[in-house]
Amino acid sequence: MKVEIYDRLHGAIVEERVLGGGLLRLAYESRLSPLLRATLLKSGFAGRLLGWYCDTEWSRHKINGVVEELNINMADFEEPVGGFRTFNQWFTRRLKPGARPFDSDPQVLSSPADCRLTVIPKLDETTAIPVKGARFRIEDLLKTNPEETARFQGGAVLIFRLCPSDYHRYHFPAAGNRGDATDISGRYDSVNPVAVAAGIPVFTENRRVVTQLDLDTFGPAAFVEVGAFGVGGIVDTHGNDPFQKMDEKGYFRYGASTLVLVFGPGRLSINQDLIDHSANGMEILIRTGETLGRVSKS
């Protein structure tokens, strides 16, 4: 399966470079799929083993090959003295100051991550979220009851899919305060479109962390970190203090993963180009800090 995305910066449709594409097809498009999902992808053991290896100094020898295969521009990133000692240290690399500029206007929502973005500007009456051949309910994503999710009825959802080639730290898209966080155990299926198109319910069955936010200009929101195959951990780096726009919230260790932001009705007006491409089934390549929308005037 070829994955095409829209590169917003260059205004062109490009083919996504997929690390481990053969394994993806084996896990989700072959006759072995049921067996692999019932063993390797259910408990997360394979991902934890891979994460252990990526924390060893042996793993540093993988770095140059992956940088070349995925065509990663390392000029944007800080390198520690002595270089990266492990693959995971490289994977969770930090940006150089100013590498991802953003609009400081509090009325503007900025992207929390480098990603492939899908937006749903308004949840329908059943609160079902359609994503490339799959539909899931907001209450199942947040693992709560319909009464609790009623405040998001008619609101907006933004889905940020991160790949191994991406910067894997992520940020608060606007200033505010954080509320309760819930760690939900689950599977470790891939979040690649190959898996989603195969009908795998990654958004409601994968391990995830749901954090309630109270944003200064956008009101209540849910910030969901979704784990996936190869993700050795979802790491919070901020804590419970109030946050400013684009403060770092955390990072994913090795693997592909996803963030989901859920907003209440009438709070966010998403940029029209993002709406149009999402409506056509096309994910949009976005960089950290890019403008996604503004406070709704309605």
Image: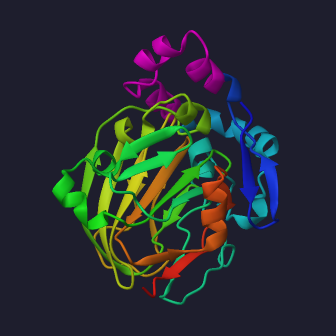
| Residue 26 shown in magenta | yes
Foreground residue, 47 or 179? 179
Q: Position of residue 123 (x, y in %)?
A: 40, 59
Q: Is residue 134 left or right of residue 147?
A: right
* Vertical comparison of 283 with 8: above or below: above
Instruction: Please tell me which residue lies in front, 53 or 3.
Output: 3
Asked if residue 269 lies in the magenta stretch, the reply is no
| Count of labels in the image | 0
**What residue sits 19% from the left and 59% below the top?**
148
Residue at image position (67%, 51%) is: 282
Residue 180 appears anywhere in the view: no
Tell me which colouring the rendered structure shows.
rainbow
What percent of the width, then of the height, locates residue 34? 47, 14
Q: Quadrant of the N terminus?
A: top right
The foreground one among 63 and 197 is: 197
Q: Is residue 203 visible?
A: yes
173 shown above or below 20: below
- Give left or right: position of 7 versus 35: right
**Image point (33%, 35%), residue name:** 186
Q: Position of residue 195 (x, y in %)?
A: 55, 31
Residue 109, horizontal then vertical, whole percent:
51, 77
Q: Which residues are magenta?
A: 23-52
Q: Quadrant of the C terminus?
A: bottom left
- Magenta span: predominant SS is helix
Q: Residue at 39% x, 24% y: name it.
A: 42
Which one is nearer the viewer's eye here, 139 or 28? 139
Q: Quadrant of residue 175?
A: bottom left
